[in-house]
Amino acid sequence: MTPNPTAVGNPFAGAKNQQERRERITRWLLRLVTFFIVAVTLGILALIAIKGSPVVFRSQWPFVNTKFLTELPSTLHVIEDVKGNKQEVEVGHADEVKAGLGDNFHSETTISYSGGGILGPIVGTALLVLVSISVALFLGVSCAIYLSEYAKHGKFLELVRLAILNLAGVPSVVFGLFGLGAFVLTAPVFTHMPMDRSILIIPLGFTTLSFEGWDTCVLSGGFTLAFVILPVIITASEQCLQAVPQGFRETSMALGATRWQTIRYSVLPFAMPGILTSSILGIARAAGETAPIMFTAALAFKDKLPWQKALPPLPADASIFAHWEQSVSRLLGVFTESVQALPYHIYTIAAKIPQNEYSERAQYGSVFVFLVLVATLAATSIWLRRRLRAKYRW
Amino acid sequence: MPADLNNDSTPSRPTLGSLLLKSQRRTFLGVDKQKAIRFFFASNSSAAVIVLVLIMLFLLREGVDFLPTYRHELETYQHAGLEFCDLVEQPLAEHQQLCSKLRRVLSASLNTITYQARSRRDAAYQQMRDVEEETRLQRAVLTNALAEVPPAALEKLAQLRQELLTATQLAVSRLAVPPSLTPSEGWQLKRDLALLSPESAEPPLVLELLSAAYIRVDTEAHASFKPLVEAVEAFEAAPDELHTLLNTLKKHARETKALVTDFHSSGKGHGRKDPIDFASRITPLTSRIPELSGRIEAYAQRAQTAAASLPPQAGTPQATKMLSEMRAMLPGHLTEMRAAAGKLPQWSYEKRVSYFKVVLAFFFGDAWITNSSWQDFFGFIPLLVGSVLIAVLAVLIATPLSIIAAIYTNQFASVREQDFIKPVIEFIQAIPSVVLGFIGISVLGDVIKDVSHVSWLQWLPGFPIQERLNMFNAACLLALMAVPTMFSLAEDALNNVPRAYIDASDALGATKLQTVFRVIVPSARSGISAAVLLGLGRVIGETMVVLLVAGNRIAIPDFRSGLGVVFQPAHTLTGIIAQELGEVSRGSAHWQALFMVGIVLFVISLLVNWCARAFVRRFELSKS
Amino acid sequence: MKFTLLALLVAMTVTATLQAQTTLRIRGSDTLGAKLVPQLAEAFKKQAGNVSFDIAAEGSSTAFTNLLSGTAEIGMSSRKVKLDEETEMRSRGKDLREFEIAWDVIVIVVNRGNPVSDLKKKQVVQIFTGDIRDWSEVGGNPGLISIYTRNTSSGTYKDFMGLAMKDREYGSNSQKMAGNEQIASEVGANPNGIGYLGFAYAHAKGTKIVSIEGALPSTAEVKKYPYARPTFLYTSGLPTGTTKQFIDFCFTASGEAIVTKVGFVPKSRAK
């Protein structure tokens, strides 16, 4: 600092210096606290990345541990020989290895869920997300269109907004209870033989409509998750709709279009990219929730993918229609099975298996994959939103 | 948006275009296409309202029967006479606490004499276990070979023995002799341990000697604290006769309860049995009231005599203090016992259990006991206390952090810093809670525990801690989860401060810091409070972290340990649902109780939201 | 509304797929379901080929709730069925069949660093009911005892109450853990911890088995140890088809070999 001649004898100079120092110190303290949060977050991510990435990536081609991503979870057998050497063996090979060791075989420990890969949970989560995002987008965008394009100020609008706000605050485990009560135990199905627990049976002649619930399955879980993310979708969609300039609507109206035509041709096309982008955040949220699917869809262990269900073999002379029917029922059957899901899988391996060097791999590997999936979704959403903002600047 | 744009009134003279349009406008039941579309969207927009109502409905449907079911259970508890037994049993439980104190006093006193011998023996045994652990492979092989039914070849056995010996010697050579043993003892220990084999049933000689030495010292110690030892024994034995009688009564009550259960479950089927004659079932209990009171009195007398014979001083000052604590507690306990005896004659099995009482038992009950072989209780307080304590702690941690971060980012940070900080903090939201729970179990728990054992931190309350899974651990993770919510809301609140306020402050010559802390932050206060409240709402409803990390102890935390209470484990409202709901049969009292907990959670979340809105509204008013 | 339309669609698929179930769904005890039954299932699959298993182990109570609602073919339970559960099954016209597949030993474990290595039966009762609160009361180093138990729906939770606690209530200072493995790892990490485990889980890192009045648990004379109990599979009605094959498999020599390997004692050798 250049010496300032006028400062000489200035009675406030000292105080000012002191004050400046105080300002600087405070500023640094604030910065310290802020970067503490940042450091903790990055630390957690780094920890997971460091411990998890060796499980998923390989130093050689194809650089990815395809086994971990394409196999179902299974029990890991750790076989110890008399010399104390341990080797890890997948389920199918334990007996061969033991036979090979012969007399040298000492002991075998098994660690559930730690062998194989995590394809089952990944597929399950994908199915759950598919169902939930379809339902939530449908309901959410319709709701947003009404709120932004049709609704007038009034009691109803107030009520809807209040409900959305409150819905956003409902604990996820309460959604789980709701899903259990509503979808698992009460939702309507067509069946010839209604169960005892059905609360209402409507005979339809050729079959009956029975309110006996869907049992724990992808649909129950997906619908439950849909309501968890509904507020997110509604809010985001409404923002996107409102970002479309008023002039677009007025121009369309002036040309004689009806309200629906205006929405269909002049508003939605411009809002849709934004809506879809923001809904990716909803996907990330749906993929990450555990409590809502605990009682409605998730299963700790399943040794088949949802579509690999054993169906009764068709007779050799079965018509093409029978084949067609079977593949359709196989396809739709995917949604009526309970599945493994990534978050629930992580809960299982965090709480129900021991913490040691063998289980750690499965644990950190799953967490890493899960986090990468969720983070990619979130990051894509943020990035796309930025690009969109740059593109549609009105 | 002007509403009359909606109005599609037909022009007076139809043009070709309007005719074409009109031809499309078919009506169905008086509703044209536009109206139908509008109605469709409106009905969809009510989805949120409907879902909220449905949540409440379904929770109530499963939960509302809880009150009658629980009432029935409590009535059975009363009619079968379980309550009668508990009248005596519950105050008697304090006897064990007093005993526990006495046993600790005794052990501390004896320890003054036996400490050295005991620790020497324990250290030596620990060494033996270490050696055994190191050589467990070879030992197992040898044991298996010895157990083989056609016995293994001698050479093979010899070879295995040799292997074991080598391994043992290796393990022994790595041992560090504990300082409490003399060098010669250490040498002997090493020599004996090196010869350990699975066939020798007796422990090595040194260990036997050390054990014998300990027993000798222990006998001496018992002799020198003879009055204390005898008094403690007498005190422990004081309620024996009372217990015997009580157990007979309890057995009878339990049988009655089984009859009731049987009666009700068979009622659902076909063979309906005769209702139970409670009056005759209860007489065997009530007829023994005089005997019971007599034994209670005898117990009180004996306990008093035993307490009187306790020496005034124990071995250590701490033990003496505990002894006087125990003495201070005894009269209260005995009064309670006598009061219980007094209550017995008034007790009646027929008293009705009112719904008010049932509600009270749920909302203010201090025990959540399920799958019990005596009586299930669904008391809500331990869970609520756990939930609230964890949530408040999390908010206390998160509030300063996130608000300071918001102030810094909003007011001081450069644009580049902002571009770094904001996405990172927003990203926390994307981390699924189960991942944080996993971090808590696998990393944070051990970190907190290790830190609590650092010697220069021992002045902190509750240190050193012994549980990895505790409320503080959960609260730290929940605080991290609450940070993004609170951060972004607080930043919004700071952004909403009118520009004029800042300009005015600048014009008055305030420094940046003064402007921030005396103008901006105070005027954003209610926005910040709303942020804190919404953070609280987020935290109290969180499930996976608390389920995995909080330690799941269903008890009201012991607040006597001051602030150290946060290092105790606890169970929570959300955690109990997640842990127990998957496992109970539908329609049972337990199932319904869990749905009741869900209802309470739902109401809490609505309340928190409402409060936050109220804050924001006040904030908006004060601004205008 | 679309909502009901979707529901209808779903309903149709449910009816279409309900008949095609050949998977064996097994529900119930964590003690059996975490290790023994999955391994029996794996071995059975190798032998019988085209079977698929669907195993969830959340606690013995879930065996009966699932059998009752027809969502499981086999229930695993580490305790005998309770009277009210049986009557409820019967009232719904379901006939519960019981198969005692193996004996399990519940061992009491403490941290390896804990000097206490033997407990009296009475002390066990007192510790788990919370009457004894400090290790110095049973000859250990002073320190509050941390009790780790299974969660309340577990059969082990209930069995232990009957076997070791004279049907008294667990102390309020007990912590409810999700499974055997979690108890083992917490006891291993806490120098003042105590807990109980199925024998199959007993040799975990950092833990030590406590002898009860001098008796160490052994699979050779399982019924002599105070805390041993039988474990069961349940079916509703006489098992048929694959279910029967699987249950029969558990009693064959190769099935019993697996039972032994996992740390249980086959019924035929329990004495």
Image (cartoon, rainbow, N blue to C red):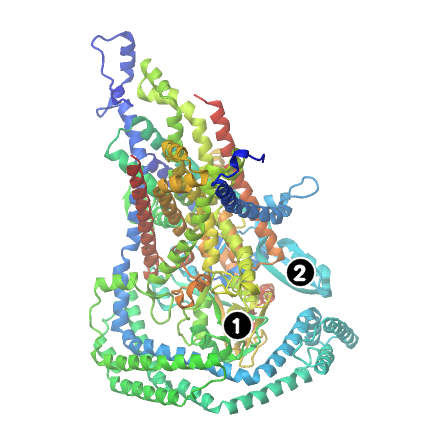
Q: Position of residue B448 (x, y in %)?
A: 53, 59
- Toward which corner of the image does residue B162 lie, by quadrant? bottom right
What number is the disc on residue C108?
A: 1
Please tell me whether mark 2 or mark 1 is closer to you in this view: 1
Label 2 in the same subunit as label 1: no
- Of B360 and A119, the residue lying toward us: B360
Q: Label 2 vs label 1: CA separation?
A: 26 Å
Q: Residue furthest front?
A: A9
User: At numbered mark 1, what does the secondary structure look like: helix, strand or loop?
Assistant: strand
Q: Quadrant of the N terminus of chain B?
A: top left
User: At numbered mark 2, what does the secondary structure look like: helix, strand or loop?
Assistant: strand
Badge 2 amino acid: Ile
What number is the disc on residue A184?
A: none
Q: Position of residue B97 (x, y in %)?
A: 40, 77
Badge 1 amino acid: Ile
Q: Quadrant of the C terminus of chain B?
A: top left
Q: Which residue is mark 2?
A: A79
Q: Is residue C100 above or below residue B582?
A: below
For the point 42% across and 57% down, the residue is B579
